[in-house]
Amino acid sequence: MTTERRAGPDARTLDRTLREYARGIIGGLLFSLPLLYTMEVWWAGFIARPSVLLVYLLAGFLLLFGYNRFAGLHEDASWGEVAFEAVEEMGLGLLVSAGILWLIGQIDGGMPLSEVFGKIVVEGVPAAIGVSVGAAQLGGNGKGGQGMKGRDDDESRGLPGQVVLGICGAVLFASNVAPTEEIVQIAAKSTLWRMLGLALLSFALGGIILFYSDFTGSKPLAPKNGLGTVLSLSVINYAVALAASAFILWFFGRFEGVSLAAGLAQTVTLGVASSLGASAGRLLLLS
Amino acid sequence: MSAEKSRIAKHPLEWAVFAVSLVVVIATVGYLAYEAIAGDDSPAALSVELGRPEPRGGAWAVPVTVHNRGDETAEGVKVEVTLESPGAAPETADFDIAFVPRQSKREGWVTFRSDPSRGRLTGRAVGYEKP
C-alpha cells in the first residue's frame, strides 16, 4: 500500500517535498526553541569535552534511526532509506540550530571553532529530533510525510519500538528542564520521602497515561491485559525514563564529583519529566 | 520496498538537501573526532593581558583581555588588576567573568582613580571554578 502511494502520482513533487521540509524545520524549532533560549545549554556547548559531544551526537543519530524506523517512515523502509532520512534530519537540525544561534548572537566569527561547534551540536540534536517528528507528524490529512498507514497502533509496534519511541519522547520532554539548575537544587534539598513520592508519581503517571486515561493512542485495560502486563509495561516505561534522565544529566556534567545518592536524586527528579515524555510524549509523537 | 524503487521516488531537491546535510554532519563529526583525539586534556590556563589606559568618565579605564589557553573551561573567573604608583598605596580593581571557555578569550575593563601611566599595572586571574 505504501509502495503505491510513493510510486504513484503523488510520489515526490517539488511542492510536496518543500512542504515536508517546511514542516520538518518548524518541528525542529518547536522542540528546540526552549533549549535555544536557555543559557545553561549554551554553556554546555563550551564546557562539554569534544569526546562527550561526539557521544551525544551519536546518541542523537541512534534516536533518529529509531524514530525513523518505528514511526517516521513507512513500515517496509530499507535501512538505507532510514539512514538517508537520519542524515538529512541531523543536517537540517544542525543548520536550524546554527541559524538561530547566530540570530540570537550566541555564535559569531570571533569565537573559537570549538565553542561554535559545541553550541551548534548541543542545540542541533534536539532540533534534529524535532525535524524528524515535524516532518512525519505535523502533516495534515492523516499522514503528510511518508505514509505510516496502518502503523498507528501502538501495540503492533512491539516492545522494541515502544522502548525506542519512549526514549525519543523522554529525551524530547526532559531535555527542556534537564539543563537547568533547578534539578540540582530540588535534588539537593529534597528528603528521601519526597524522592520516593516523586518516583511513585512518575511511575503512576506512566501507567495511568498508557493504560487508563484514554489518552490518544493508548490502549484501554482489556481483559487480556492482566495486571501483570500493565505493571511490567509501566516498570519498563519508568526504566526507560530513568535511563534517559541519567544520560541527559551525565551529558550536562551533573554527575561529576557527585555522590551516588545525589546523582540518583537528580535522576529521580528529572524522571518525572522523562516519564511523562516516555508515555504521553510517545503517544503524542504517534498521534 | 527495494532500495532501487525508493531512489526513483526521491525528488532531486531531496538529494541536494541530503548532500548538504551529509557535508554538515561529516564536518561536525570530523571536527569533534579530531578535537577529541588531537586535543589535550590540560586544565584551564588563564593569563591576563592589559591594554592601554585611557581616561573615561572621570576615571582611567584599562582594557583587560583574559585568555584561557587550556583545554578546560574556567567558570566564575575573578580578575584582579593592581596599580602600584610610586609614593602611593596600591590601588586594586577587579571584576568577574562567568565563563572563559577552553582556548578562548573574554574581554572587560577595570578603572582606576589615578593615572596608571605613572605606575605599574599587574593583572591576574585570582581564582576560578572548574565547571
Image (cartoon, rainbow, N blue to C red):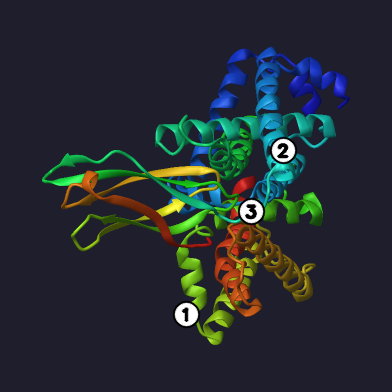
Which quadrant would residue B2 be assigned to in this image?
top right
Q: Are marks 3 and 2 on the same chain?
A: yes
Rounded to the nearest angstrom, the CA distance separating label 1 from label 2 is 41 Å
Q: Identify the residue position indicated by label 3 in the image.
A: B42
Q: Report helix, strand or loop for mark 1.
A: helix
Q: Identify the residue position indicated by label 1 in the image.
A: A189
Tell me which numbered mark, 3 or 2, is placed earlier along the sequence. Answer: 2
Residue B93 at what x, y percent from top left?
27, 57
- Residue at 54% x, 26% y is A22
Residue A4 at what x, y percent from top left?
79, 22
Asked whether, in this view, residue A205 is left or right of residue A40, the answer is right
Given the image, what chain letter belongs to the residue carrying mark 2?
Answer: B
Tell me if I can see residue B72 in this picture.
Answer: yes
Q: Nearer the viewer, residue B38 or A62?
A: B38
The quarter of the picture where the N terminus of chain A appears is top right
- State which mark lies toward you, 1 or 2: 2
Rounded to the nearest angstrom, the CA distance separating label 3 from label 2 is 16 Å
- State which mark lies toward you, 3 or 2: 3
Asked whether, in this view, residue A274 is left or right of residue A59, the answer is left
Given the image, what chain letter belongs to the residue carrying mark 1?
Answer: A
The mark total stands at 3
Q: Amino acid at mark 1?
A: Lys
Q: Amino acid at mark 3?
A: Ser
Given the image, what chain letter belongs to the residue carrying mark 3?
Answer: B
Q: Identify the residue position indicated by label 2 in the image.
A: B34
